[in-house]
Image (spheres, coloured by chain):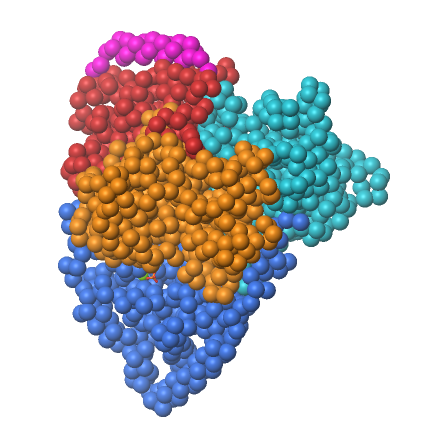
Chain colours: A blue, B red, C cyan, D orange
Amino acid sequence: MSTDAVADGHGAAGSDTSAAPPIAAPMRTAMGAAGTDPSQLYDYGRRPPRLPDPVNVANDDLDIALDDRLAMYKMQQILRQMERRAYDLFLQNLVKGTSHLSLGMEAVSAGVARAQRPDDYTFATYRGHAHTMARGAPLGPVLAELLGRENGILKGKGGSMHLASVEHNMMGSYAIIGAHLCIANGTAWSAQMRGTDQVTVAFFGDGATNIGAFHEALNMAATWKLPTIFVCENNLYMEYTPIDLVSAVPNPAADRAGAYGLQSIIVDGNDADEVYVAAAAAVSKARAGEGPSLIEAKTYRHGGHSRADPGKYRPDEEVEAWLQRDPIPLYHQRLLRLGVDESTLLSIQQDVAARVDEATEFARSGAEPGPQHLMSDVWADGGSAWRN
Amino acid sequence: MSTDAVADGHGAAGSDTSAAPPIAAPMRTAMGAAGTDPSQLYDYGRRPPRLPDPVNVANDDLDIALDDRLAMYKMQQILRQMERRAYDLFLQNLVKGTSHLSLGMEAVSAGVARAQRPDDYTFATYRGHAHTMARGAPLGPVLAELLGRENGILKGKGGSMHLASVEHNMMGSYAIIGAHLCIANGTAWSAQMRGTDQVTVAFFGDGATNIGAFHEALNMAATWKLPTIFVCENNLYMEYTPIDLVSAVPNPAADRAGAYGLQSIIVDGNDADEVYVAAAAAVSKARAGEGPSLIEAKTYRHGGHSRADPGKYRPDEEVEAWLQRDPIPLYHQRLLRLGVDESTLLSIQQDVAARVDEATEFARSGAEPGPQHLMSDVWADGGSAWRN
Amino acid sequence: MAELSPTGTIGAATAGLATAESAAASPGGTPVESTELSYREAVARGIAQEMRRDPRLVMLGEDIAGAGGVFKTTVGLLDEFGPQRIRDTPISEQAILGAAAGVAMTGVPVIAEIMFSDFFAVCFDLLANEIAKGRYMTGGQLQAPLVVRTHNGAGSRFGAQHSQSVENWCMMIPGLKVVAPSTPVDVIGLMASAVRDPDPVVFFEHKTLLAKKGLVPQGDIVDQLGVAKIVREGTDCTITALALMVDRALQAADRLQADHGISAEVIDLRSLVPLDTRTVLGSVERTSRLFTVEENPRLCGWGAEMVSIVVDEGFWNLDGAPVRITTPHIPIPSAASLEDLAVPSVDRIVETISRAMG
Amino acid sequence: MAELSPTGTIGAATAGLATAESAAASPGGTPVESTELSYREAVARGIAQEMRRDPRLVMLGEDIAGAGGVFKTTVGLLDEFGPQRIRDTPISEQAILGAAAGVAMTGVPVIAEIMFSDFFAVCFDLLANEIAKGRYMTGGQLQAPLVVRTHNGAGSRFGAQHSQSVENWCMMIPGLKVVAPSTPVDVIGLMASAVRDPDPVVFFEHKTLLAKKGLVPQGDIVDQLGVAKIVREGTDCTITALALMVDRALQAADRLQADHGISAEVIDLRSLVPLDTRTVLGSVERTSRLFTVEENPRLCGWGAEMVSIVVDEGFWNLDGAPVRITTPHIPIPSAASLEDLAVPSVDRIVETISRAMG
Ligand SMILES: Cc1ncc(C[n+]2csc(CCOP(=O)(O)OP(=O)(O)O)c2C)c(N)n1
Ligand SMILES: Cc1ncc(C[n+]2csc(CCOP(=O)(O)OP(=O)(O)O)c2C)c(N)n1
Ligand SMILES: [Mg+2]
Ligand SMILES: [Mg+2]
């Protein structure tokens, strides 16, 4: 992604929700599109770093209630501190399976979740800790699940990649790319039929935009005017491969919006306020029966793709630039600029720290799931019998 | 499809190959997009007929050699007469399986094939008789295949939906929607690697634009700059359902081109000349290493979707209007306007008729495949052994 | 609203022990009036019965509404239930099953049609990895009260991509129930039980059975998953079959009796998951020989599973090796002569069994 | 360039009759120098060997080039063969297998990586309906010299969508060959035979074996598809196993001998299609008992097929029921304690066999 491409679209959607976000012309920039010269395909290691846009201070002026902002601050703290804890526990060899952290990307989940109602639905990918917690799932059971404990939110049966909290209408995390975008249409369709005006949000990565299910889901949502909000967290990389090496367009989600009769919306995914405003607009549109939205949030993960991946395929300069754009300190500064006391923010941080410690305690105290859980929960009757 | 939508794009690509075809803005017209009001979803039977554009007489002036035009005339005659014969044989209960005719759509296969070199690759759907014959596959074995005979082009093992003639680089007809678009990229990639400048053409229907494989194929072709030419034959209907009821954009292929950084190209699929010129431009582009193209040809099938389907879901007025736009009489008239003798055309027709009779003779004389064919051809060694 | 089932009750799917009993008799024994219906018509009637009962139930699929289905198995449903409940979709099988899965997650029952079972391959992730595993992966949180209907099997000369029998593709996936009726009355009763089942059920309608007629009692019919039917009693060997193969097994049994003096018991399995192994094991206990007749291609077909169960648990009852009669391990050819050779025929069944028993 | 194979020749895949013979001995009997290599390294070495031999051979997949594969099974290949021959792809499994199929149709050999075997479900149409059936459907016109590599199996605590053993998904499809090596040397030799095979081969690399080390002779190694190896001789029973289960079967055999006095013969099947039934039937003829150890979930696993073959053709050799040891018919749980219970363990193998033989 070139800085140009980001500058093109983003910010506008956030700065004025009444105006239609700009429709980014689907085009191939010299740098955004891979393969413009087949002999230069995959010019590994010689590509310039993909740098973020400068911070948009004007977003201070977005019309957002302070309560909402404090709530988003707190949520980002929860996500950050919980993810750091998950990482620590991983280093202590307590997280047995894989795990995909959203460190650096917290503003997206926090901003979107704040625009949702408790009865709205959410779907996430394997990188779903943040999205699950942002919907209110209890922290202890989430952490316990990562540790594979019986008191985990999935009884230890799903693990990090499959977090769900149906009680909170968080309908699951899906580890095979694409499918959940189609499933999200189903809860949206159900709400449409039941006339509940619930909306459904489905998060996914930049890499997911190139899989077939993405296309099917977007077309069905648009055709049926479903209240589905598709949120692409474009962190510039798939696992290890930069998304622009394998996509025909520079903005892999936004540049495809037109293919479904939708507007192209790009937001700064490192600014919870900008995310919130765009999400709120999409939510209102969906509640009003005016159909789906597709939002592309530009962001960056601080760490590797999963577990111990050191993310060495990313140029230092790029990582450094994005660390400077860490959504949380920036949001902290915004709140200070808006007159919030440092001490208020510190006490939120400390509150959260206490909750994270408590959650850790809870998780560590859980037993490993015993054999009675092995054969349960395949069927609605609780069992797994396939014969008499 | 509204006449507006067609008028928007089509013709231009054909009338001037040097100029870039127009990029149709992806947008939803009131009529083109289904679901604008969920309560009006699927307003069966009360929708206006989807009428064709008026004939574009200006295409007479396209710079096409008379030889090419006569060849396309002849090819359309072959396709028409062969398909009619296939239908007759079906009525005589000699075609056992299903069959999907291209009656009314011949201009697309004839026009595209004329723009191909013999060593170029072609892929078709289950509606692939025309595309197979247009590449030069022998008529007798094609017809014999429909009759399930041993002298069929596939030894009777594939039937109508799987016609192939690898000798003619016609790499098969695929009966499950979408897959062959991905496979077509493979022959294109192979040509690119081998440096042969062969291009690959993949035909598909309007309905196929909504399946995931379409998206994956287009993105990979664009990213890798593959010499793949995707030709959508938009005959306005899937099996029985109008495509505009289930698509988010009015031109299901062309309006998606931008999602892959490609130009939006719409042509009159009932005018072989316009098809030919657009295909030739795409072929040149692909041969020059400049990547794939996506062409949407608007056309109509005269009969039902398959076999005995009477196509009653289509308004009479619509069918009538499109019959008036039958590509073959129109092309006949063009050739007369261009000074070709009626007798020349008649003798072509008669030649073709004789060949079709001969093919019929050949097909009817074939034996039913015997048991020796049952277990052959699974593996390259000719057999099907899975154990020792 | 007389709810009939072979056992008279709707028990837990795996509780069924009953063997064949005509659904055309009410629990009280009074005969119920019957009409003749085709298997095709039975599909629409079964769906309509359930849509009338449960106003939440919806269905989606390609060409199912306006056109009544390309196999005419959903004729009349759009007229009765309207376009919100009977929905035509784009050609997007992943979106279809995804939408069904999502609707079901909210507790709303749903039927999705995948036009040909061969097309499960374009949406297999939804079926095998999402729908089947959701409940388990979430420790019981997610529900999936959905039915995936499809048209299965050979006989139409459609060739390798439209003729497969893929019951085993589903049977091998933990978390899916698998049903394949062989008669009109079973279509209705099992459709009802599939719709009412809180778990994902894959419902196979056999293309070559669509025109088959049968007597169907009036009123609602509700059957039970996981209950096989002994459709012919016999003493010398047991033949298990499914869907189209049931009639062939029955005809073969008649010929075995007439020409070879072999008395074959024929079991219509009706569902593969849950599998009524007790009925099969009980029968083999009496007959001491097992034959399976399956339309799946050879390798890893359901017959293999059946054989492995019967030898494991009934080994010492067996007087000879269980024998599987299957489609060979090849794609289905299109020519009539070849397709007829590929799929187990009455001749082949008779020959195989008489040779094995001879 | 010493080409080694268990039989010393590269014959038709189904012609193989040979049983185990160390690949670390040259045909002439002179010892070849060996180095220790991990299974993971063996994958890259096997591919490199074939890419050096055949300059047309290409490979594509997600993160395989720049990153050397997410399992590091393709490390070094980009450097040696360049970005035209080792291609990173978008997350588009259908496009990946499609491109591979198309390349292969032109006679160019190709390897496609599908990162996890669970993802076969998102491209199953390409695998099961296109690649597998192309040649047959076209009466022999189309060719498909391609290998689909994938990482298979449980043990990583990844949960239900990244831990499946899906060899049976492929075995059940006519037109696919299916290989699953258990040692580094087999990885190389079978990779070579898979690449050289003119038919589509699905090549399963087991995730939990990636770190396993083994001695590998220097020079090129070429093995043969369809040849099982007797990896331990025994007289009382035959255990057939595949991939990760081979080591467990071997350990179980040691314990059966030590603790129960049972002498178990262990057969590493190595490929499911072609299947070396002669080696298995020959072994059962000697031992009279068969056990299968498979990681597939229960229903329609390859063990069922194996049992059905052995009872059909070796019934009178059997002294007792063949018994299958499988993962139960459930999705794979993620917690370590549960995953370890799910997949057959040495304990479970010992216990099952000793009980059955007791
Ligand atoms: C169908 C499928 N293909 C491949 C994978 C393996 N995989 C897991 S995460 C990932 C990268 C996804 O990138 P992106 O969508 O950008 O999401 P991110 O991880 O950056 O959040 C890949 C290729 C998968 N899970 N599913
Ligand atoms: C994946 C898949 N879904 C559904 C079908 C059934 N089907 C066959 S043709 C057809 C309609 C296709 O319409 P279109 O793409 O417009 O092509 P046309 O038949 O009009 O040429 C459908 C739905 C199929 N063959 N494959
Ligand atoms: Mg990403
Ligand atoms: Mg069409």
Where is residue A261? Give x, y as percent: 37, 51
Where is residue A280? Give x, y as percent: 41, 68
Where is residue D140? Give x, y as percent: 35, 26
Q: Nearer the viewer, residue C276 or B44?
A: C276
Quadrant location of the N terminus of chain D?
top left
Q: Is residue B354 magenta?
A: yes
Examine the image and state in which quarter residue B269 appears: top left
Image height of B43 relative to A253, above or below: above
Ligand 3 quadrant assignment: bottom left
Can see residue A344?
yes
Q: Nearer the viewer, residue A252 or A380?
A: A380
Image height of C28 relative to A344, above or below: above
What secondary structure predominates along the stretch shown in magenta? helix
Residue occupying the point 40% across, 41% down: D228
Residue occupying the point 48% across, 16% down: B94
C261 to the left or right of A191 = right
How many discs mark residues in the rendered view?
0
Can see residue D93?
no
C283 to the left or right of B170 = right
Where is residue D81? Give x, y as percent: 18, 48
Residue occupying the point 68% across, 35% down: C288
Residue range corresponding to the magenta coloring:
B339-368
Q: Nearer the viewer, residue B46 or A60?
A: A60
Q: Is residue B290 magenta?
A: no
Examine the image and state in which quarter residue B139 appears: top left
Examine the image and state in which quarter residue C205 appears: top right
Residue occupying the point 44% across, 25% down: B375
